[in-house]
Amino acid sequence: MSATPTPSPAHAPDAAPHADGTSALLHAEGLHKTYGSTPALAGADFSIRAGEVVAVMGPSGSGKSTLLHCLAGIVPPDSGRVLYRGRDLSALSDAQRSALRRGDFGFVFQFGQLVPELTCLENAALPVRLAGAGRKQAEAQARQWLERLEVDDIRHHRPGQVSGGQGQRVAVARALAARPSVVFADEPTGALDSLNGERVMQLLTEAARDSGAAVVLVTHEARVAAYSDREIVVRDGKARDMSAMAGVA
Amino acid sequence: MSISHTLLGLLETGPRHGYDLKRAFDERFGHDRPLHYGQVYSTMSRLLKNGLVEVDGIEAGGGPERKRYAITDAGITDVEEWLATPEKPEPYLQSTLYTKLVLALLTDRDASSLLDTQRSEHLRLMRELTRRKTHGDLADQLICDHALFHLEADLRWLETAAARLDKLAKEVRR
């Protein structure tokens, strides 16, 4: 295998104190979100540091995905704010937020995230190309991650021609290929059997830790959450940072 | 776990000294709880008395650690019967977690916090086992998976209990 891809200086882990006085990479403060008359998020205050793998746990409908969408700047909170490297996401323009999601953030979802018309290699190279790299460079970079995720052999296949586990590894490679600072993973193993799911988690967390990326991992499965460093529990829209609980480092 | 049957089973693969038996046991099954030498020798004395093992040879120097043990035909039959007998599934009806939860509700303590603390503790151990599994061989992976599946079952119960806490509180306080 080739050398482990490493983060570019622009996205290197940043543990220096920010304007808000914290060393957080991502910081949530008093987040609330309501859809119609349904409160989806009723309070979230916590920080995530560079290189941390943080599980967001809770029952179905508890507000986990809403929290992830707010943290990633996909939906704006009704009140409260999300700081990324000390910058308030809601103070950014749509174009700036889109650029952030393309360059600084990576995403892995449960399924349906690969472009069916593109090969696995083209899919994995997509965020690198969108960030402005030429095809050759983007594909070379993507191949490093496909190798790391053990799916380089299927790089010329289209998503419809590979198994669910292989497709999910390609999705992880794609999420990491642009060397993001934060990977948002929403039930990334939800559609996989136990063995495949565990392998994907192992590869995702190892690769993210090696590259210094933080991972926000939404899951309702304890065995998946066990790959994290700590957990945030969401119940009835309220997110609680459990690292303050006894026995948790 | 039946230590005597496990040692007998190991002996069926070939005669061994007591310290070899301990080492083989610890490597394969000891994990966090290695055998004491005393346990090995007292078990071997009992198996010897019951005719399930015999002394295959004694090295010069004397002492129990110099004896080499071999399994007898009666011992092989004993192992055979033990392996063929299914283990009784654990009914899990005596749960300390459940008892603590009910007592917390009965005494108006914060049951929700109790469940949260327990969840964190379970996850802490699950993380430790997951790390060990990631770096271990297949045998390590399987023994860790066995523990992880049980811890996961506990966690699912903790989630179920948390979701029904209000209803349970009403029932236990009736």
Image (tube, rainbow, N blue to C red):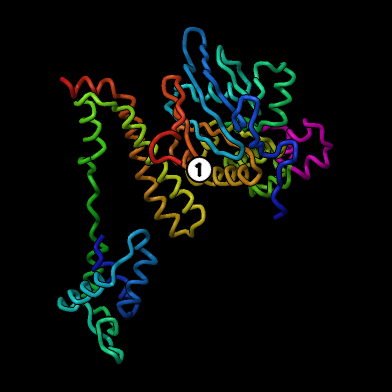
Left/right of residue A187 with respect to residue B77 in the rendered view: right
Residue A35 shows in this picture: yes
Residue ID for mark 1: A227
> In terms of secondary structure, what is the magenta stretch mainly?
helix
Q: Position of residue A163 (x, y in %)?
A: 59, 42
Q: Amino acid type of disc 1?
A: Tyr
Please state which of residues A21 and A147 is positioned toward the viewer in this rendering.
Answer: A21
Does the segment drawn in magenta span residue A120? yes
Secondary structure beneath dot 1 equals loop
Q: Position of residue A198 (x, y in %)?
A: 51, 45
Query: Disc 1 is attached to a residue of which chain?
Result: A
Q: Quadrant of the N terminus of chain A?
A: bottom right
Residue occupying image coordinates x 21% and y 72%: B43
Left/right of residue B64 with respect to residue A56 in the rendered view: left
Q: Can you tell which quarter of the image residue A188 is in?
A: top right
Q: Which residues are magenta?
A: A114-141
Q: Is residue A108 placed above or below A28 in the rendered structure?
A: below
Left/right of residue A18 with respect to residue B71 in the rendered view: right
Q: Can you tell which quarter of the image residue B151 is in?
A: top left
Circle 1 crowding by C-alpha within 10 Å: few under 14, some 14–19, many from 20:
many
Please state which of residues B148 and B169 is positioned toward the viewer in this rendering.
Answer: B169
Q: Position of residue B35 (x, y in %)?
A: 30, 66
Residue occupying image coordinates x 42% and y 45%: B126
Does the segment drawn in magenta span residue A218? no
